Image (cartoon, helix red, strand yellow):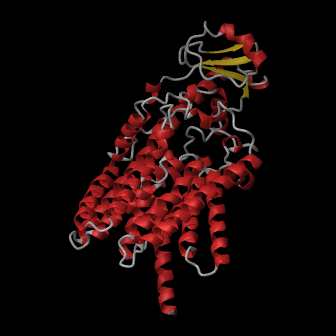
Amino acid sequence: MDNLLNKESQNDFKLYFFTTLLSIISYGFALSNYTLSVDNEIPILADFGLDLGRWGQNLIRFHLFKGHLEYFTMLIGLFFFSVTAVRLAKLFNFKEVSAYLFCGLFITFPQISYQVVFYMMSDIAGLGMLLAVLSVEFFIKNINNPSKIKIISYLLLASLLIMFLTSLYQILIIVPATIYFIHFFQNTFKEDFDIKKELKNTMVFVGLMLFSGLLYLISVKIICPPMKDDGYLQSFTSGSTNNMFSMFFDIWKENIKGNFYYGEKLYVIVLILSLLLLVQFIIKKKFFIIRFLILFFLLLSPFLVSFFITNGYHPPRIYVTSGLVFAFIIVFTINNFKKTIPSNVSNLLVISIIICNIYFITSLFYACNKIYLYDKRNAEKMYDLLLKKYPNFETTEKVVYFHGFYEFDKHQVFRLERSEIFGGSIFQWGEADNYRVNNFFKLSNIADFNMVNKEQYESIKDSIDAIPVWPNEGSIKMVNGVAIFKISDKKGAKLYFE
């Protein structure tokens, strides 16, 4: 017995080590090349995330870590994702090579890149995924416990974990549901599958999810300030609600074909293998309806959030379960057809997918780095020209105003198609908000400016039209003690007092 336990522990350690090492290899370029991408220039203040109802994110990001740190924050996030992958492999009962294949597919799926590129989310997303796995583990292992006290205790613990992961990032609440339905799906292939018992447990789990959601809403009322009607989250539902089903179908179709964002290309494999599984279900007939419904849910659920978004902005980071579904469907299908498909062929296929995913991940961060370096060079040129033209600027209050923003195609030579935040420039994203640009100069160790205030802006605004656009001569000008950088003729994002 001891030998079996020791062997299992050794196997677990090897799997943890493999997955963590693979994550570091996959994100090697990102970890070793400093890149100040969009949103990472924003400082973490005491009220960070509270206006979005993310008090858990505020607790970790501000109170625990006092912000985020280059390299370290991403490394911690990759560690959490790696542990999540191994826990999922064990929960889904993938053994030996299958466990390695699952972990490799999960940790290298490029959707994670769209999470960890945000330092404010790098470790938060990974921790939330891990908590989701633990909550389902507590439920599954204790729902049939003969002790009612233990059942209630573990269900309450699972509820608290789901409440907390929701406070980290609301969309993560779909993760426990996805994990549980995958577990249910696998149970239908067991000889002792009891449909009545499983449906009863599922109803309890649904109740658990609803209770967790209620706890989260109560916690938000207690901890967070009221959300603004025109806030960030509300902006996602600010568009037209006409043809919502049609728009969602188009988005789902592009995602399932792997065409919605850069790095998703291989997701079409999930569609192909799901059709193959469906044919098998039809032939076997047993529990066809249940298996079909769960399989359809797995194909639909990663992208379901897009149904409720009406403003047209669907960032890939919201599809938090797509990597989970991707890895599960591939490994499950391989195991299901292992008598038909030689193991060498299936292993080679998965290794090829993992290599392609690492290529996608590296390409994303490389493109992002090139845009950052381009912006940094421009920022340095701007500041050098300012000092050359006004040598005494450093003795002033160093008040600056950036007027305008780059057009989208300014960085097209560096940008990957459909790469969302990875193709963003600080001088273009969000119409070059002055707060963002000022912080970019500061964190890039170029200059530490002060924001223009309302009175100062009123004193310079009539002078802006006559100033030429950067990089033309005269595009940087001091007016009434304010350094004006004119990036374009069109005014950029509103200032904080507008």
> Where residue 488 appears, x then y in whole percent?
55, 17
For residue 67, side relative to residue 89 (left or right): right
Q: From the viewer's side, name the closer residue of 352 and 234.
A: 234
Q: Nearer the viewer, residue 311 or 431?
A: 311
Q: Position of residue 64 (x, y in %)?
A: 72, 56
- Whether residue 370 is visible here, answered yes or no, is no
Whole-percent x, y for residue 405 in the image: 55, 22
Q: Is residue 375 visible?
A: yes
Which residue is painted at 65% across and 22% down in the image? 494
Q: Quadrant of residue 163?
A: bottom right
Instruction: Give the left or right position of residue 221, taking residue 172 as reference.
Output: right
Q: Nearer the viewer, residue 485 or 253?
A: 253
Residue 281 lies, with reference to residue 441, above or below; the image says below
Identify the residue shown where x is 51% and y is 46%. Answer: 318
| Residue 427 lies in quadrant | top right
The spot of residue 303 in percent (x, y) is 44, 46
